[in-house]
Image (cartoon, coloured by chain):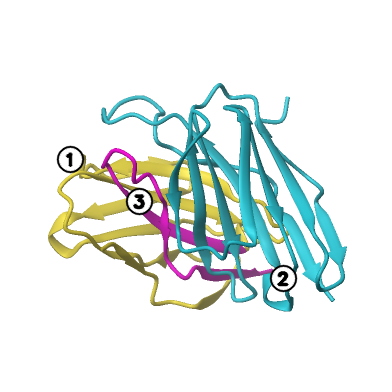
Chain colours: A cyan, B yellow
């Protein structure tokens, strides 16, 4: 009954390869996110989707392409991997609301995917 | 623009000591949320607490307590009678409540080590 799941947990690949990370949430949330955590533990948002629509794209290189087939899934595809892409990638989800009530707008994170580019 | 500063990069204390993790934020928005997340050595990000900008009541949950002060733009986190299992990296974060801008802005994190 995992709330936000990601696969794979670890990904080791060569420079120049293309890889995908999958994310699924069973919380019924309408918004999903990808965050990147670098080697210094700094967390920064990459993308946000609301009901399958791209809402936030934080100047991420075009090699990164998120895909949301439905509102429970947000996958991240990375083309032509570079050494600097090595990081931990976290998926998250929340139920967006502009009302200060309930549990809305709290982002719940998946377990992370550690990507190592050699 | 929003910014969250956790000036303490690392803190190390002996078990059973009380410890406070500082968080200072900057935002021009009047409505926003503040969060604390815990990242234990296993790597996952665990949600601890959310406060909205209109609720300055302090909160206590077991050994954890949070002090939100808008006057100083701070949202500090105190662990009372610390335990080894509290060892983790703790992140303070902010979201402005603006439609279409639900991105968490994280502080740099504070690595807390509780020694037996």
- Which numbered mark, 3 or 2, is in the foreground of this view? 2
Q: x, y percentage for residue A112?
A: 69, 52
Task: Say if labels 3 and 1 share a chain.
Answer: yes
Mark 2 Cα shell of 10 Å, populated few (<14), some (14-19), many (≥20) = many
User: Which residue, given by chain and number where applicable, does mark 1 sit on?
Assistant: B54
Q: Residue A91, how many percent across, how many down?
A: 61, 46
Residue at x-position 79% and y-position 69%: A116
Dot 1 lies on which element? loop
Q: Could you tell me how far apart the alpha carbons at marks 3 and 2 are, in whole angstroms?
A: 34 Å
**Numbered disc 3: secondary structure:** strand
- Provide the chain ID for the residue under circle 2: A
Q: Does residue B15 appear to the left or right of B19 in the view shown?
A: right
**Label 3–label 1 contact, CB within 8 A:** no
Specify start and end residues of the magenta stretch as a single range. B88-116
Of labels 1 and 2, the one closer to you = 2
Relative placement, left or right, of A37 versus B66 is: right
Q: Kindly identify which residue carries mark 2.
A: A86
The residue where tag 3 is placed is: B66
Depth order, front residue of A109/B84 = A109
Q: Upstream in the sequence, badge 3 or badge 1?
A: 1
- Work out how far the residue at label 1 is from the one at label 2, CA to CA, in angstroms: 39 Å
Q: Quadrant of residue A10?
A: bottom right
């Amino acid at each position: 009954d995992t709330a936000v799941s990601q696969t794979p947990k670890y990904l080791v690949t060569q420079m120049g390869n293309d890889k995908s990370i999958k994310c699924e949430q069973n919380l019924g949330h309408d918004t999903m996110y990808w965050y990147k955590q670098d080697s210094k533990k700094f967390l920064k948002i990459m993308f946000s989707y609301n009901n399958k629509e791209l809402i936030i794209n934080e100047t991420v290189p075009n090699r990164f392409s998120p895909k949301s087939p439905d509102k429970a899934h947000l996958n991240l595809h990375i083309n032509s991997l570079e050494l600097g892409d090595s990081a931990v990638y976290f998926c998250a989800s929340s139920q967006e609301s502009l009302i200060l009530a309930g549990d809305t707008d709290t982002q719940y994170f998946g377990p992370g995917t550690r990507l190592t580019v050699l | 623009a929003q910014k969250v500063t956790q000036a303490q990069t690392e803190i190390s204390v002996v078990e059973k000591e009380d410890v406070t993790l500082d968080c200072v934020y900057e935002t021009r928005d009047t409505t926003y949320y503040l969060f604390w997340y815990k990242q234990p050595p296993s790597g996952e990000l665990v949600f601890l607490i959310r406060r909205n900008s209109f609720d300055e009541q302090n909160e206590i949950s077991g050994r954890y307590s949070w002090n939100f002060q808008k006057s100083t733009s701070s949202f500090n986190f105190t662990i009372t009678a610390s335990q080894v299992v509290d060892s983790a990296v703790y992140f303070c974060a902010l979201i402005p409540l603006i439609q279409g801008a639900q991105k968490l802005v994280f502080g740099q994190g504070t690595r807390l080590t509780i020694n037996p």
